[in-house]
Amino acid sequence: MPGSLQEARRLLRSLHHQHDLLEVRIDQLGEFNIRELLAGPRGKVIITNRRSSEGGMFRGNTKGQSSILANALHGGAEYVDVGLSWGKEFVQDLVDTFGANRVICSYHDLKKTPRDLGNVYDRCRATGAGTIKIATTANSISDNVIMFDVLDRARKNRQEMIGICMGERGVISRILGGKHGSWLSFASLTENEKTGAGQLTVSEMNTIFRAGRISRRTKVFGLVGNPVRHSRGIYFHNERFRRTSSDAVYVNFLTDDIDDFWNSYQRLITGLSITMPFKQKIIPLLDRVDPVTAALRSVNTVIRKRNRYTGYNTDYLAVEELLGRHGSLKGRSVVILGAGGIARAMCAAAVRFGAHVTILARTAGKAKALAADFSCQWNSLDQAGNLSADFVMNATPIGMSGSGMENQAPLPSPAYGKNTVMFDAVYNPPLTPLLKDARRKGCKIIRGTELFERQAILQSRMFIGAIS
């Protein structure tokens, strides 16, 4: 989206060996000679001149738009993108003059994903354009499936189509489009040069997700939760898939409603990581839960085999291993902060090792319920300063980047001494305020990154086993 003709020509010259196709948004260039823009060394281009209703800056009329796009095609542009909003006849005139294969008929909805997206597809297809582009805004995770269904329909019709859901909840559509036959996906050159909400960079698309390799056969895995933005899973699991030459991809599924996600995606996924706040809510949706996980009543891994979904908990196994490295816990005092899924795993492991466990949580009822399940003590989190412990384990999001509590610690400094082992499940940042303070005191610490990596290795083995 260059700001001047000179910048546009420089980018075209410098990038023409690096990418398959370059979209040049010309709507903020003002008056210029488009043939001059297209002259000289360059790669294949899509010329796009978008008006404000489509998220652009062009303020001209129909005659002006027709002249610009026609001059682009006369000047050798491989493709032009023309909005359906200009009218069916407008698009058909370009198709009749320059051929269907050079015209992309696009539709944009900057507010939502229409439920009747199939009708939009029909209207675009009726123009005769060689390629259809539909870009809508995802307000829920299920909006992407509406787009995928239309892409599947276009594939059956042998109609070239680009389908994208914009926004944070639509990122997966940009990555997984190839599984549903999307002709291409868009990516920005850098983080600061994005031209659409939710757009990833070329590096992220190619290096992390290997998006160009995704096809109908690619198995889909991912993290389900809220928030998911700071998860390291996309790096860890996609790298494991790359190393093992597995035709699979791991993405973030940001959702507010686990039932909405499950109803939309269960037929599309092979395995999942489950994080806050769905580790317990996912259980009724599964076909079975393995015995250890059933006792924990907390699932962090889902595997699909023979169309049956089984829940597991690799957090427990990882916690057990990490605690075991610090000597015997038998008879020692353990304080666990929080009462969610990871707290249950921590509690089960500590009790199994024979520790005396106390659960502290902001919601007294949750602390009491968890304590009752494992015959432990409990109290409210505001009583943390009155307790001493050999081990303290934080299972709350306090201290996590992006939580709004990144500069806070769940426990006051006087509540523990230098002989305490401090275990924080938060892994972003690697050193939370709690761990920094504990390290200053001389405490032994267990970082959330250690927990993440250990449970992720166990999870990865399950994922790769589910691919075959």
Image (tube, helix red, strand yellow):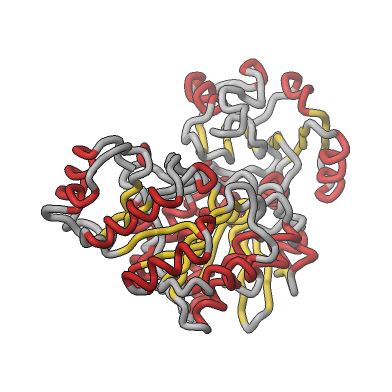
Nearest the eye: 261 or 112? 112
Nearest the eye: 44 or 463? 44
* Outermost residue, front side: 63
Nearest the eye: 182 or 401? 182
Residue ID at (31%, 50%): 24
Q: Position of residue 7 (x, y in %)?
A: 22, 38
Q: Up-down: is 314 above or below 336?
A: below
Say which quarter of the image contains residue 165.
Answer: bottom right
Q: Position of residue 48 (x, y in %)?
A: 37, 52
Residue 200, can we see it?
yes
Say which quarter of the image contains residue 60.
Answer: top left
Residue ID at (75%, 55%): 280
In the displayed structure, does residue 39 sit left or right of residue 159? left
Q: Position of residue 380 (x, y in %)?
A: 81, 29
Q: Up-down: is 430 above or below 372?
A: above
Residue ID at (17%, 43%): 10
Residue 451, can we see it?
no
Q: Position of residue 454 (x, y in %)?
A: 50, 53
Nearest the eye: 278 or 212? 212
In the displayed structure, does residue 50 sit left or right of residue 316? left
Say which quarter of the image contains residue 74.
Answer: bottom left
Q: Up-down: is 326 above or below 112?
A: above
Labels in figure, total: 0
Q: Up-down: is 447 above or below 307?
A: above
Residue ID at (41%, 65%): 104
